[in-house]
Amino acid sequence: MHIGLNAQLLDFTPTYRSGGISRYIYHLLVALRELDGPERFTAFVSQLPADPALAPTSRFRLHAVGLPTRRPPVRIFWEQCLQPAALRRAGVDLLHALAFALPLCWRGPAVVSFMDLSFLRYPRAFNRANRVYLATMARAAVRRADHLLAISESTRQDLIHLLGATPGRVTVTYCGVDPAFRPLAGAEVAAFRARYGLPPGYILYVGTLEPRKNVPRLLDAYAVLRRLRGGAPPLVLVGARGWRRVGIEARVARLGLEGQVRWLGYLPPPELPLCYNAAGLFVYPSLYEGFGLPPLEALACGTPVVTANTSSLPEAVGDAALTVDPHDVAALAEAMARVLDDCGLRARLRAAGPAWASRFTWRQTAEQTRGVYRRLGSRGGA
């Protein structure tokens, strides 16, 4: 069976576009490439990356479409107008749309991946055109696809209850953790801190800076934490700005936190494990996530985690983290204080994190995804 994968959202630029869905696409492609079996894979990308983990093999190749599909109108044109012919020329038997959208005139078997339904849960975080397009294509995909993949049970339930997906047509394939996220040697971590001028034991947030990530409430809670304890380690924010600014600088100034909050912006992927390891506490109060990779990566590094008790985040962290209502600033501050002040709790969380995170691997994601391909293939796509 020859599987074609629409990977137009694979992105390596140092912006928010390289997070989230791009990371899912990248790691799934790498893991599918490494599987043994008769399947062949062609991933359609905007341009060929210089990455040996995606080098062609006898069963795996990338195909650059030759258009600037990073621009949404161009991508939509390619997906809807040019992709079906490209799939036929390549001899594709089954299409896997890695992000919501199926070409409306594709008549072959199809699988569609869903990260989340944030455009329905938090519509005000999107401009109107983007929101309408995503909602329209998501509804069409739910109607027309042979099978749907959700990256968490939370997303699966959203597909069922918000879009009317048939439960038996939705499979959960959790994200994995890159093996690079693990406890690292102290000398490496100290060198990272020195490079960025960071003190030991800082409080860390990693993620795109956009409204649903709830960073303003994190700043409010950090201000409360400092009052509760008479001080706290610095708060370090890592991540590119998303499609809407969240007023971080103004909030920091209004709360009197200048000098206590640092924004490092985008960090290259090789530095993220070091950044997690160097932190004394990781905090992720997101209002809504399709899965929530950053808290799981922090756990894999042995960093204590405080995160939200909403959407998919309890699935991602299990009992290895503290979870709180992300709308409750006082509860968030109290949870951070507990971790900082209770050495026994910190030790328990540090030990629990890597053990919990080891349950999530990209190979498992790829094997479960291939299992769906094979079931559809054995039924002729029915």
Image (cartoon, rainbow, N blue to C red):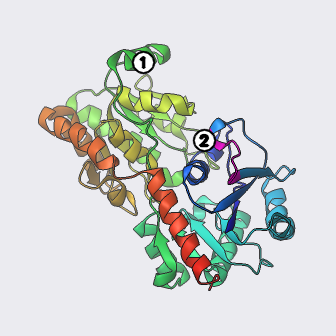
Q: Closer to the camera, 167 or 195?
A: 167
Q: Closer to the camera, 325 or 95?
A: 95
Q: Closer to the camera, 210 or 160?
A: 160
Residue 133: x and y in percent read 72, 69
Residue 58: x and y in percent read 70, 51
- In which quadrant of the rendered image does the N terminus lie? bottom right
Q: Which residue is mark 2?
A: 241
Residue 324: x and y in percent read 28, 54
- Per the rendered image, the range of residues in magenta is 53-60
Q: Residue at x 72, y 40 (%)?
A: 49
Main secondary structure of the magenta stretch: loop
Q: Residue at x 43, y 22 (%)?
A: 259
Asked if labels 2 and 1 touch by Cβ distance under 8 angstroms, the answer is no
Quick check: is 369 in the magenta stretch? no
Task: Please tell me whether mark 2 sits on a helix, a strand or a loop.
Answer: loop
Q: Residue at x 57, y 31 (%)?
A: 268
Quick check: is 58 in the magenta stretch? yes
Q: Nearer the viewer, mark 1 or mark 2?
A: 1
Q: Closer to the camera, 166 or 129?
A: 166
Q: Where is residue 266, by image quadrant?
A: top right
Answer whether residue 256 is visible to the viewer in this image. Answer: no
- In which quadrant of the rendered image does the C terminus lie? bottom right
Please state the total of marks drawn on the protein image. 2
| Location of residue 299 with respect to 9 vertically, above or below | above
Q: Which residue is mark 1?
A: 193
Q: Residues within 10 Å of mark 2 (few under 14, many from 20)?
A: some
Q: Residue at x 79, y 52 (%)?
A: 63
| Location of residue 231 with respect to 356 vertically, above or below | above
Answer whether residue 350 is visible to the viewer in this image. Answer: yes
Q: Amino acid at mark 1?
A: Arg
